[in-house]
Amino acid sequence: MTVLVFKTSVSKNKQVKRLKPLLTQLVEPKGRWNFDLEDCDNILRVETRQCPSSVVRLLQEQGYVCEEL
């Protein structure tokens, strides 16, 4: 597993709740993810075997800015 870190435009818990099923489905059964909304970059950390572009694409398709750090 790899830990991927992203800067995002997700800024509210309500948005995280909407993304929850999509992110959970994206990571393997043993993968994990979390947002740090208190960070100025609204950091998303993902522990997964997926490539970074899969996470970026998922968030962008939902209308959010997402870039790997």
Image (tube, grey):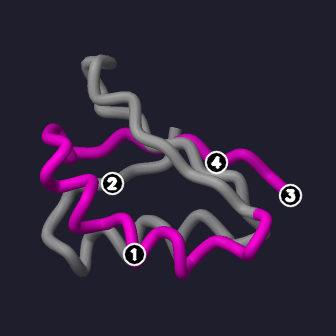
Q: Earlier in the sequence, mark 1 or mark 4?
A: 4
Give the residue drawn at x 32%, y 18%.
Answer: 39
Give the residue drawn at x 33%, y 54%.
Answer: 66
Relative to 43, is 10 on the left or the right? left
For the residue pair 29 and 49, the one nearer the viewer reads as 29
Q: CA distance from mark 2 to mark 3?
A: 20 Å
Which residue is the site of mark 1? 21
**Mark number for residue 1?**
3
Secondary structure at badge 4 equals strand
**In the depicted structure, whether residue 44 falls above or below residue 55:** above
Which residue is the site of mark 4? 4
Residue 54 lies within the magenta run: no
Residue 25 lies within the magenta run: yes
Query: Magenta segment, which residues?
Result: 1-30
**In the depicted structure, whether residue 11 falls above or below residue 21:** above
Asked if the residue at tag 1 contacts the one at tag 3, i.e. Cβ–Cβ closer than 8 Å, the answer is no
Relative to 60, is 56 on the left or the right? right
Q: Quadrant of residue 29?
A: bottom right
Label 1 is placed on what type of residue? Answer: Pro
For the residue pair 66 and 30, the one nearer the viewer reads as 30
**In this view, the mark in front (2 or 1):** 1
Coordinates of residue 56 in the picture (x, y in percent): 42, 66
Q: CA distance from mark 2 to mark 4?
A: 12 Å
Q: CA distance from mark 3 to mark 1?
A: 20 Å
Label 4 is placed on what type of residue? Answer: Leu
